[in-house]
Each structure stands twice: as C-alpha cells, then as structure tokens.
Amino acid sequence: MAVIVALLPVLGARGGGAVAEDHGTHGTHGTHGARPPRPHHAAAPASAMEPAAPVLSRAGWTATASDEETARADNRAANVLDGKADTLWHSRWSGSAAPLPHSLVIDMHRTEVVSALLYQPRTDSPNGRVGEYAIHLSTDGQDWGAAVAGGTLADDTTTKTLSFAARGARYVRLTATSEAGNRGPWSSAAEIRLLGDPGLPASVVDLPTTGWTAAASDEETAQADNRAANILDGDADTLWHSRWSGSAAPLPHSVTIDMHRTQTVSALTYQPRKSGSGANGRIGAYSVATSLDGVSFGSPVASGVWKDDDTVKSTTFARPVPARFVRLTATTEAGNRGPWSSAAEVRLSGPADPSVSGSWDRVTGFPLVPVATAVLPNNKLLAWSAYAIDRFGGSNGYTQTAIMDLGTGQVTQRRVDNTGHDMFCPGVAVLSDGRVLVTGGSNASRASIYDPRTDTWSATGEMNVPRGYQAMTLLSNGDAFVLGGSWSGARGDKDGEVWSPATGKWRRLPGVPAKGTMTADPAGPYRADNHQWLHATSRGRVLQLGPSKQLNWIDTTGNGTVTPAGTRADSPDAMNGNAVSYDIGQLLTLGGATAYENANATRRAYTVDLGDGTRPVSKRTGDMAYARSFGNSVVMPDGKVAVFGGQSYPVPFSDATSVMTPEIWDPATGAFTKAASMAVPRNYHSVANLLPDGRIFSGGGGLCGDCATNHADGAVFTPPYLLNPDGSRKPRPAFTGTPPARVANGADLPVTTDKPVTAFSLVRAGAATHSVDNDQRRVPLTFRQTGSTSYELSVPGDPGVALPGTYMLFALDAAGVPSVAKMITIG
C-alpha cells in the first residue's frame, strides 16, 4: 500500500493516476452544469462576454519557472504560451518533488500596461491546480515590490481572471503557495494570458482643471462653436470638433491641454459626444504624449483603439509622468464615417494623495464571486454566491460559501449542503447574538442560520411566503422582519412576516402588504418589490424609506399595519440605490434608478430625519459626482459615508458605464469628495462592508457563468482618516482593556485608552447583498471622562436606537483617527 500511495503524485501529475480527493466538497460538483440563469434575468448582455481590457498579444514573450518537470514529461514553463491547453507547465514531480512555493515568470520583452492574469488550469488531471497565489510585477525582473494581487482559487478547471491595479510592467510573476486540493506539493498551468489596459489605474483621482487651457491642431468655428476650449468646460453638450466646414481637415487631429503647471499624470479620460448630437468624430485609434515645455513631446505614454460608442473611455499611461502639456492625437474615426475627430470632455488623472483620497490594498482573489457578505464577531468575513461559484440557476439545495480571515487574509471555501438551501438572491439579517439569518432566494421558502461561534450552518423554520430579492431587518425585540421578494415564487403578494428566535418559526403579517411599498417599475411586481431599504426603530416598528419614493411606517405587532409617511422629498423611485444610518434617527439615501435596469441612474442623495417617529423629513443633500445604480454604501466610525461602484446606466452582469471612483459624503457639509479610484468594477452582485480595523471591504460583481464580468475577488480600502500624505499610517488610539463581551441597553460601559480621545461610536456589524445593507447603523455615544484616559460610555437604553446585536466599538482622537474596534454585543 505504501508503494501505491507513493506513486500517486507521479501518476496524477502525468494525468494517468487516481486522485485521493472528494471534489464534491470543494465546489466542483455542479459548478458547470448546463443550467441557464433563471428566467427572471435576461441572458448576459454582449458587453458581459468580453473583458473590458484587451487580451495582450503574446508575440515574443517567454516564460521561465522556479522549477519545471523535464525528466519524465515535457512540462516546461514555455508550454503556458504555446496556445495548446493539452500541454502544460508543471513543477518538478519526478524523483524528489520540488516543494512549494513555485513561481512562473512571464517576460513580455516590452513594457505593457497590465491589469489581470488569466490562469487556465490543466484539464487532464486536478493535480497542481493553483490554490493560494500571489502576483508581482516588475519593470526590470529584479525589483518586484509588494504583491499586487493574492488570494485563493477554486479547485476546478475554469479559467481564472486574477485582477489587479493596472500598471506598466515588463515582467509578471505568478507564485503558487498551495495546491488547490492539497493533493501534493505541485503547481501546474495549461495556459497563461495577460489583460491590458482596462481604462483607469487604481488609486488615482481627477486633477482639478482650474486655470487649464486647451488648443487643437484644428477646430470648427465657422459654422459651429466647436473650439478646443469646450473639452474643459464641464458641459458634455458642448464639444471640440475638427474643422468640418468647407474643406474638412484631414486626420490625424490633436488636442493639447496646458495645465500651466507641472503635475504627475497617470491617465487620460475621454468623453465622446453624446449620441443625441450625432456620432461623427468619435475617436478610434489614438495616442497620448506629454511634454514639459509644449515643444518636445517624445514617444507616446499611451495608445490604443476606442470602441465606437458614447461611453466614457480612459487610457492608462505606461508609467506616471511629470508633465505640463498632455496631447491626445486621433489617427482614425471610430466608425470610419469621415476624416473627423471630436470630444465632449477630456480629463487627466494623477496619483491620489492618501490623506485626502485614501488608498487601496492589493486585490484578493476568492474561490467564488462574493454576492453576499456578513461581518462576523470573530474578525472574519462570511461570503457566498449560489449553487456554483460563478453562476446561478435552479433550486439545487446547496450553496458555495467562503470565509476570509481578516487577520491573515486567508480565504477558505465550503459547500453547504445540510440545510437544503441555495442561498442565492436572499434576504439577510444579523441576529442579536451575532448569528446570520439567510432567507429565500433560489430555494425560495428556506431559511438557514450560520453560527460563527461553532462555524456551523443549520436550518430554521421555512417562510410562509416563498421569496427572492426580499428585504430583511432585525427588529428591536430581536425578531426578524421580511418583506417583498417577487424574484422567486409567485409574483406579487409578498406580504410581511416575522421570524422568532425563540420558536424558529414565522408568523404572517396580513396587515403589512407589499403593494404599498413598491416602486413603479415597468417590469411589474417581480422588480417593484425588490431590495427594500428598511430601518428598524422602537417597539418593533420599521421605516421603509425606499427604493420607492413613498415612505411607510410599518408596525410588526399583532397582524401589523402600514402607515404612509410621505415621500422622499422630490426623489423619484430609486431602485438599486441604498440607505445608510449615519447617526441616531438620521439616514442618507444614495443613487438608484427609476427602474431595475436600462434606465439612467441618478446622482442625487437625500437625508431622512426620523424626527419624532411620525412623519420623517427628507431633504436633498449634495449630489454625488457620478450617477450610480448597483453601488454600495458604508457608514464609517466618524459618521461619514463612503459609496463604491455602480453604473450610470444599470445593466445586470455588464461592466459598461462603471463608476470606478468612490466618493465620501460628509454630514457636516453635505458634500461628496472623490476618493482613490478602484482597480475592478463593482456593479450588480457586488458588496461592501466596514471592517473592525476601520477599513472597508469592496468586492464581487457578476455571477453570470461563462462571461468576462465575473469578479471573484475583493479589495480593502483604507479611508483617508488613517493615512498621512506619503501613505504611511497615522498613529491611532487603542483600547488598553477589554470591554465586556455583552452590554445591556441603558448600561454604562467603562473603557480605557492609551491616549486621550474625543469621541466614541458603535457601528453595527453589517450584512450586504444586492446594494443593500439594512443591518449597518452608526450610534455615536455620549460619555463622561473619569480619568486622563478612562471613560464611562452611555449605551442607549432604547433597543430601537442601539438595535440588539454585534457592534464595533471605536474610539476616535481629536484628529478623527479611529481605533481598531472592540467587538461587543448590545442587548
């Protein structure tokens, strides 16, 4: 027997032996069945089938490896570039197998902007599939710097897109630190490809245009005001156009921006003329060059070809460059309609100041698309997708889950079968004891509970009404309330019901019909009652404050009642926007659209003041810089709200019209500030969560099967309150003792810190899916100082203010820098 076992790694590596692995528990069973998406969704759009970034030509590339098998098989590194999926690179397995880690280096022999590595596993055997990985970039093959991406891959045969912030590089190194199935110390790859420029590098911000001027090689002024200056006026209805009257000026055409000061520039953004004004002059092939003096421009820092449509385009420079002048040259018209060029707006971006705009950590790969997430009391993040890691459909009775350890960054995967529940498109609520209640979705009447204390899943009572896309919130008495959800089951009549933790059963609320809480979506009930914004208050009451423009008070006692509570000021319906509780009785609503999809999103934001609990007062606050639907919003310890991702024109599964720049809203000013741009689009099926260390996780998007817009990854955003201008961390206060694990409403909570602080806040651990997180809320605490660094905090006595459950307790110093949170349970 020992001899047979010893041979298994060798035979498996050659594709001819058995493998001691039960794939049914590692996410491969059923992952790539023929089940189509549910009929509630149209097929993935054409824009979902191609990556936003181009696949780079591999001409002239070479590959080397830390080790390779050549004695008993031709498993050289070069095989990953030969275009043949049946040849492969494999770490040395004959004789004494080379131990992990193993690395593979691609030399492009030229500098290219790179944004992702496509890893195609072998298909003849599972042995050597990469599990945990890291990606490094280098311009010289010597200095690799910090990893730009890392994470854990699913143990299956699908090609994996390992994304990272776009950057110019010559060398790309993939390092495998584990084998996906833990079958042996091996690594392998069938093919490796790289994606190029997706448009905008991460951690940049738009440069202010004050004082800038623009000039062009030629411009139309005889029959229209198409001057170059129009590209800087902030008005997309005005444009620069090459001379078209009389004898049209021939291509190429160029427009040059003079910033009148030297700045570091990383990217250029081009907004074509709107479709309503015609398509002529949309730029196709282009190049960008820079200059310090306006005379010597040198070789291009970026070039490419833009698509013939009116979406905003960007191009990433091969490297950040100091410049005063930036010249965009058009060499073709995108539709070959004539010798013209035009532009509505042109903007430049440069590296972000971390102390103003925050910064992003590396992109972390997950073994699934994180469609839903919940912050756990044990410094971990729970995530799940559907029956499969990258697609949904049917009612399969099991769910792919993953847990990320926030301390180590490690991600582990598990398929949950025992509850008979496919938890795709669910309602979610974090219970008063920190457990996570998940309801409905693909298995529409089921309900499951995850207990982080025991790391186990269990079933609870089924709902009376089958649902999917429903809204949930915990109530002030510890029960859970659910409403809406026509994505699953019969359409309409998804009236409210309440779950009791004491009985594990649901009771109907015949007095809480969903009808009065719906939007006027043209698709009818199955879209109109989705993803509602719910805020629990005192005595079992709930304010439903969106996405319908109509607000409603809901009383969950007895049979329940619904009382209209006015409208959200002048807001229309705002489906796939969201609401965030940033202070006691104060909420902010952001974005959304009048329909679930295929309708323009809005830039509007509103505050909603609950007042005395009778008629909330809604007011329009400052607009966001970008219209967003499918975005995610997170309240921070200081009461500011960060919003991530979304689309200006929402289309499920598409990355078109993605908003890559987050924004931060300040309640003191009502204004939004742009933050450092993201590396990966976060749209439909994306999430965001505040973490106990004061940073924010943003991830997911997609889940459309064999498409290019599945984002099985996430990244952590460090807000500016933690950073100095050079990117180093600010000193932050710290708790010096451990607060009690549980505190009653109305209790006094003694704490000590390592230095004086000026504020404390509780932020409830959240659970996010489909742009909504009804669990998160911030509760600033009153306190009295009992010593130089000791304090007594007053926990609100009303469980409708400090809702029962797990909270992150933060201390903030005079500069607004938060501590790492202590996790406590209120109630």
Image (cartoon, rainbow, N blue to C red):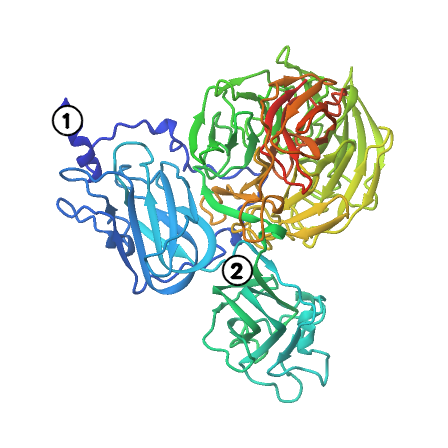
Q: Give the farthest residue toward the bottom.
A: 247
Question: Residue type at mark 1?
Answer: Ile
Determine whether, in the image, residue 751 is placed left or right of residue 540: left
Q: x, y (%) of residue 769?
A: 60, 35
Pick the front one: 459 or 432: 432
Above or below, comparing residue 403 to residue 519 in the picture = above
Above or below, comparing residue 101 to residue 276 in the picture = above
Q: x, y (%) of residue 240?
A: 66, 75
Determine whether, in the image, residue 566 is placed left or right of residue 126: right
- Residue beneath label 1, please? 4
Q: x, y (%) of residue 200?
A: 53, 58
Determine whether, in the image, residue 183 is placed left or right of residue 396: left
Under circle 1, the secondary element is helix
- The 10 Å Cα crowd at callout 1, few under 14, some 14 to 19, many 20 or more, is few
Under circle 2, the secondary element is loop
Residue 589: give its label. none
Pick the front one: 507 or 139: 139
N-terminal label among 1 and 2? 1
Q: Quadrant of the N terminus?
A: top left
The residue shown at (50%, 81%) is 296
Question: Residue type at mark 2?
Answer: Gly
Residue 341: in sight, yes or no? no
Q: Give the farthest residue toward the front.
A: 788
Give the distance between the C-alpha atoms of the residues marked 1 and 2, in whole angstroms.
Answer: 53 Å
Displayed quadrant of residue 526: top right
The residue shown at (71%, 71%) is 238
- Residue beneath label 2, please? 199
Of tags 1 and 2, the one toward the viewer is 2
